[in-house]
Image (spheres, helix red, strand yellow):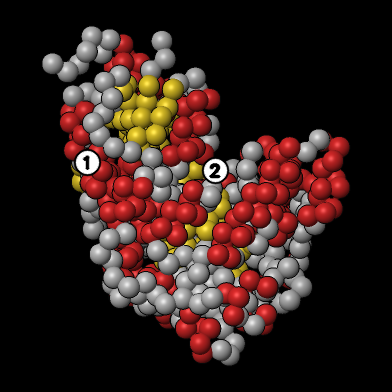
Amino acid sequence: MNLNVHAREERNGGAEGGAGMGGDAAVPREVRCDVNASGNGCPGTDDVPCPRVRRGTETLKEGLARMQVGGVIMDVTNAEQARIAESAGAVAVMALDRVPSELRKSGGVARMAAPERILEIREAVSIPVMAKARIGHFVEAQILEALGVDCIDESEVLTPADEEVHIDKHAFSVPFVCGCRNLGEALRRIAEGAAMIRTKGEAGTGNVVEAVRHVRAVARDLRRVLAADGEELVSLARELGVPVAQLLRCREAGRLPVVQFAAGGIATPADAALMMRLGCDGVFVGSAIFTSSDPRRRAEAIVEAVAHYDDPSVLARVSSGIGEAMAGTDVRRLAPEERLQERGV
Amino acid sequence: MTVRIGVVAFQGAWGEHLRLLERLGTEGFPLRSGPLPEDLAGVVLPGGESTVIGRHLVASGLSAALAAGIDAGLPALGTCAGAILLARRLEGPAPEGRIPRVPFLVRRNAWGGGAPQSGTQRDSFEGVLSWNDGQSSRGVFIRAPRFDEPEEGVTVLARFGEEPVALRWRNLFVAAFHPELDGGGPLHSLFLDACRRFGNNAAVPRRA
């Protein structure tokens, strides 16, 4: 018990605390000094954590996300795709049973990927492996943590398990990335413990319009937060539906306080560079790589485009000779219930 | 006199390195292509994914330019992925673009206790480091490499428990942890000293 209380204080650094303290979802965090256990004379016990080793801290969780900056995270559904993604220069892979465009076609309930698939993919690569849990499904998240995934995406691409409450992400040692359509959503997810934010976009469409809408919406509200008088912050917090402490974090950082990636509909090197130009730190590419005619070359081109996003001559070179992009979908033709971005609060 | 330090800025925590250099009163700038500027006094290879940074080093031609600079005495600091790229020996599949100069053996994400490269984010940790001058500081290890078999001429600057986690060889510094997430500390003092010495000596143009 004591252990849990201590861990929570440590993780929140005494700051906001705020959202979702669902005790049942809490996983006791390791405080044992088990790194290099041989003869390091660890003074820690269950009640008094070892002063020498801490795990699952905000620094470590947000730090993993910082190591992804300037990179491309690719959806893969088997070991071979994972190896192609890694050798093409992906910074991480997202392990899935089916990519979003397939989920759209097949319908039904989309759930966490099968553990054996995740492990097969983890075996195949040395880069971080991420996996998706359903919104609010903290048990799927605990399973993914137990499997040793490096980061969990609490994702609207899967069918939500809870339409009101998201996972208490502070209760986990593993970092989470969450989707957002605007600053309020982004900061609510960060208050719940997300270490990384991505736009929702409209996954599986190959159409970047929604991701652009979402990153612009975040930037527009951020400008208001940064420009506001101190005394306006409380009403701004109320309007956005977020704790004031989160607005203070934004003002301290001069931006979103965690790493922000683009996701949802990115299909070409130009799309990826566009999202970088709009201020994103990196991109997720879902269906667009392995449903295209030449996955390896498209993957390599998107990696180059993200690193050299402000150099049109490089973008022109890498956009050439990479085959057909995925066909894509006009988002306006989707029925409201087909729009994945509406999932989550 | 301030010196200019280039931070390899394709992928990873290069922004944190730039901010830290600024806080320490040094001018850092992003380095994305060769040739190296004449007044370059040092270079930082940041944390990130070594496979990805290495690819970009090759594609941009920076790998060869940096290797030539380093062989001419240019100081370099490699943290985490950057240390992997500077290690002379490496266990397991090697990323491209390496500048394998510091004589020690590196094992990528190897704090998992199991097979090579079995480390995952759950093995990431913060721990207290002991420096060889008696200082201690915090170290942030994220899917970190392990250092082994430092050869003659290598100074172990810091250990975590028994394990070497920061090394110096001539003007090259490597760390398994992330000083850029943690305010710098002893490693940056040593690295910046080396950069100042190199930068001042180079007041006379280095190239013929």
**Marked residue chain, label 1:** B
Q: Is residue A205 above or below residue A312?
A: below
Q: CA distance from mark 2 to mark 1?
A: 41 Å
Report the residue at 60% width, 80% height from top. A334
Q: Is residue A213 above or below residue A132?
A: above
Q: Residues within 10 Å of mark 1 (few under 14, many from 20)?
A: some
Q: Is residue B102 above or below residue A146?
A: above
Give left or right: position of B200 versus A13.
left
Q: Which residue is mark 2?
A: A52
Q: Is residue B82 above or below residue A242?
A: above
Identity, as a three-letter code, of the amino acid under mark 1: Gly
Looking at the rendering, which quadrant does residue B196 occupy? top left
Q: Is B10 in front, or is A205? A: A205
Q: Is B10 in front, or is B83? A: B10
- Disc 2 secondary structure class: loop
Identity, as a three-letter code, of the amino acid under mark 2: Arg
**Marked residue chain, label 2:** A
Q: Is residue A17 visible?
A: yes
Q: Which residue is mark 1?
A: B61
Report the residue at 64% width, 38% height from top. A254
Looking at the rendering, which quadrant does residue A214 occupy? bottom right
Foreground tag (2 vs 1): 1
Q: Residues within 10 Å of mark 2 (few under 14, many from 20)?
A: many
The location of residue A282, given as percent across then percent down, is: 47, 54
The location of residue A285, given as percent across then percent down, is: 44, 66
Give left or right: position of A55 versus A25.
left
Report the residue at 50% width, 25% height from top. B22
Report the residue at 85% width, 45% height from top. A234
**What quarter of the picture does the N terminus of chain B occupy?**
top left
